Image (cartoon, helix red, strand yellow):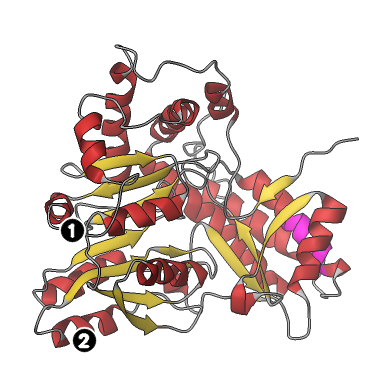
Amino acid sequence: MSRRKALLIPGPTNVPDAVRMAMDIPLEDHRAPDFPEFTLPLFRDLKNVFKTATGQVFLYPSSGTGAWEAAMTNTLSPGDRVLASRFGVFSGLWIDLCRRHGYEVEIIDVPWGEGAPAEIYAERLAADRERKIKAVLVCHNETATGVTSDVAAIRRAIDAADHPALLYVDGVSSIASIDFRMDEWGVDLAVSGSQKGFMLPAGLGIVAASRKALAAHASARSPRCYFDFADMIRTNKDGYFPYTPSTVMLRGLRASLDLLFAEGLENVFARHRRLAEGVRRAVAAWGLSLCAREPRWHSDTVSTILVPEGADANAVVRAAYDRYDLSLGVGLAQLAGKAFRIGHLGHANELMLLSGLAGAEMAMRDAGIAVELGSGVAAAQASYRQSSGADAGLQPRPRLAKSA
């Protein structure tokens, strides 16, 4: 008998029925005269998710890595200096991409489990009296370690130094799940992807560019073709694309945005906080620790859970998958075999997380980790009842929008 796997990795995430059905349609003419009636409102509504009134959003048929490349190559030239912090796999991969494009990267290495250090950014920017730094990179949510950084603090560091550098933010595992304020935080390039908070399959790279970033495009000399902003700007203004777009993904994105707006973005963020807090309490009940070293770094989209010394986290992930049809995230790079990850983002609710926590408990016991069965589930149940207002007799809170 074929059984459906429960998906609790931090991406790709579960796709709501309404989104899947929106994509299950015949292909359409992407140059039809009425196509802009669909695409122009889509561009506008995406700006609302990024919380930008003045920026421009670009959609590429790519993963988030393609969106990284688009952001960098459209605004920088070979030899430009980039200031970036590295505190996990994905912040490190972004640095690697920059190096491959010939940018000079000044790296702030941070222990895994901590976030972007605004005070060190401030020191480096103040010391850059010749203003050689052209780009400041920060990973808003490091998916490998379950760490969220304070983007607004990085902007304050740039402003305190009166520095003209552009601020680039990787929001792949945060945007549409964790509050993100592009205009308020002075973000110049924000990068995301379709497979996490947007509740779609992988396949769309999403970039939002500020007016300042678009102005930098005019003098940027990095080689580019497929990802060139200029081609997008020329065609997007009329509701079209410079090449064949993934129309089924765009239809799915429309359905995803409708679900997000029906729930309300602030309610979406609050739901992610509730789900994450239940998982964090479960981890504490197990007697284990998160990779995130302090509560200020805790991510509301992914928890990276350290296993005891001598235990094998990969054995936990294998047992969960083979015995209980549950997909958990593996530990990456220096966390390989030392941690597993639970994704609690996108189309998720309390019962989905409770079932995943139960599966994780059984898998840990199977892997020889002596957690008490039911302990984490009970702690999460108490958290979810408390946050739902059940203990206080409150009215039901806003719910996750129905998917069909």
Using a 10 Å C-alpha cutoff, classify the residue at mark 1 as few (fewer than 14 neighbours), some (14 to 19) or many (20 or more). Answer: some
The answer to whether residue 196 is left or right of residue 8 is left
Rendered residue at 13%/54% (across/down): 212
Q: Which residue is mark 2?
A: 123
Res 191 visible: yes
Q: Which residue is mark 1?
A: 220
Quarter of image, res 403: top right
Quarter where residue 171 is shown: bottom left
Q: Residue at x 53, y 50 (%)?
A: 345
Residue type pointed to by label 2: Glu
Residue 137 placed where, x, y %? 31, 68
- For mark 2, does the 10 Å Cα neighbourhood hold few (<14), some (14 to 19), or many (20 or more) residues? few
Residue 179, visible in the rendered structure: no
| Residue with the most extreme right position | 1
Q: Are marks 1 and 2 in contact (CB under 8 Å)?
A: no
Amino acid type of the residue tagged 1 in the rendering:
Ala
Q: Is residue 162 magenta?
A: no
Q: Earlier in the sequence, mark 1 or mark 2?
A: 2
Q: Position of residue 347 (x, y in %)?
A: 56, 41
Q: How many marks?
A: 2
Residue span colored magenta: 357-364
Left or right? Give the position of 88 relative to 243. right
Check the picture and name the quadrant holding the C terminus. Answer: top right
- Say if the magenta span includes residue 360: yes
86 shown above or below 188: below
